[in-house]
Image (cartoon, rainbow, N blue to C red):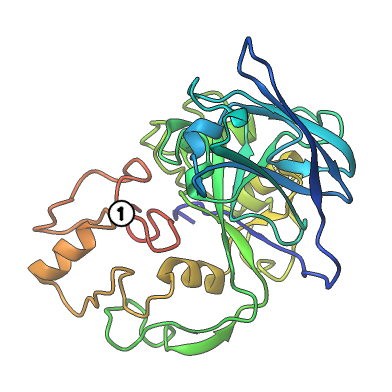
Amino acid sequence: MDKILTLAAVLGPVLAFASPTATITTVTTDPATGTVTVEYALDEKAIVTFDVLQGGQSIGGKELRNAWGDVNLRVVAGERSFRWKPEAASTVLDGGNFELKVRAWDLDSPPDYMVVDLVNNIDSLGDCDPRVRFYESKDSIPYGIQHALYKTSKMVLRRIPAKGIKFMMGNNGKELSWWPSIEKQHQVTMSADYFIAIYPTTNRQYEWVMGLSQGGTPSAHKEQDRPAVYMTFAKVRGTTTEADWPTSPDVGPTSFMGKLRAAAGYAFDLPTEAQWEYAARSGCGASLYTGFNVTGDSAAARTEMDKIAWFGGTGNPGNATMPMPVGLKLPNDWGLYDMLGNI
């Protein structure tokens, strides 16, 4: 399987119970350091996030990145607290222009973005799990998702709201295909929401999970931010054939998925064909998620493809030795990169 390694994690059913609640009890600011301490009461185990609004608008992830304690994590119920150091000295809560919000999310209905720390492989920190963090939006992720951290030592996944969605999977009859007889369009009903990685798994991410030294992947292009390629089912799931996937959820403990599951506590796996295609098309029925249908080789088709994908072929303005570093082309409407091309 010499394809890009893409990750997915299916969410459980959302139960019809009252949502968890986080209630702020005290907010204090250290006048010497500017550090803000937030204490809150959590009525049940939940994912807890926070935001600071100015004029009703979030001040953004750059300002929010210096936070530690019981926040952006799965947190157990009780009296909890976290601290936050504003990036700018002018950001103070007691000036009347800022509003701090703490939100509790049901574990089965989390925020849109999950960030997995591949380096921090410790068992736990107290009542919280520090390896998986959650953020409400792309803009609230520290440093921004294009930072090198998220292509090497951390992994960003996007929640795809898919439960109960019906979509037409397969060739729409207006796109080129290697296998037209098996890509006939048909309706699919998605069974659950799921997370999917915004980038293909890179060499360095694979090495961190597997405990390999830098340059330990089988890829000929070993730069840290290029996709990990020449993968097999034995490496990825601990199996030797495709026969038991996706019908069997079991993976080998020493495989990539086995080690990642143990570190993160989520049932990561390869996406099914339906999950991958639904995420890749991002609501677009055309052959490219820009809305363009590639019906043949033309300058217009090559120009359109070059916006979103690395690909070979005479006259391609983006032609280059592949695989290329992840995240350099335009993402689709879900914010997913390299869903077409590159391998």
Q: Residues within 10 Å of mark 1 (few under 14, many from 20)?
A: some
**Front-most of residues 116 and 142:** 142
Q: Is residue 44 left or right of residue 180?
A: right
Image-quadrant location for residue 29: top right
**Front-most of residues 208 and 57:** 57
Residue 47 is at least partly visible in this image: yes
Image-quadrant location for residue 32: top right
Image-quadrant location for residue 126: top right
Residue 247 x/y as whole percent: 71, 71
Q: Is mark 1 on a helix, strand or loop?
A: loop
Image point (18%, 51%), residue name:
318
Q: Is residue 124 above or below residue 41?
A: above
Q: Is residue 93 above or below residue 250?
A: above
- Tell me the residue that label 1 is attached to: 330
Image point (27%, 86%), residue name:
174
Residue 11 x/y as whole percent: 71, 63
Image point (56%, 36%), residue name:
154
**Residue that extends furthest to the front in the rendered view of this protein:** 96
**Residue that extends furthest to the top in the rendered view of this protein:** 32
Q: Is residue 153 left or right of residue 127?
A: left
Residue 179 x/y as whole percent: 37, 80
Three-letter amino acid code at the position of disc 1:
Leu
Residue 296 x/y as whole percent: 16, 77
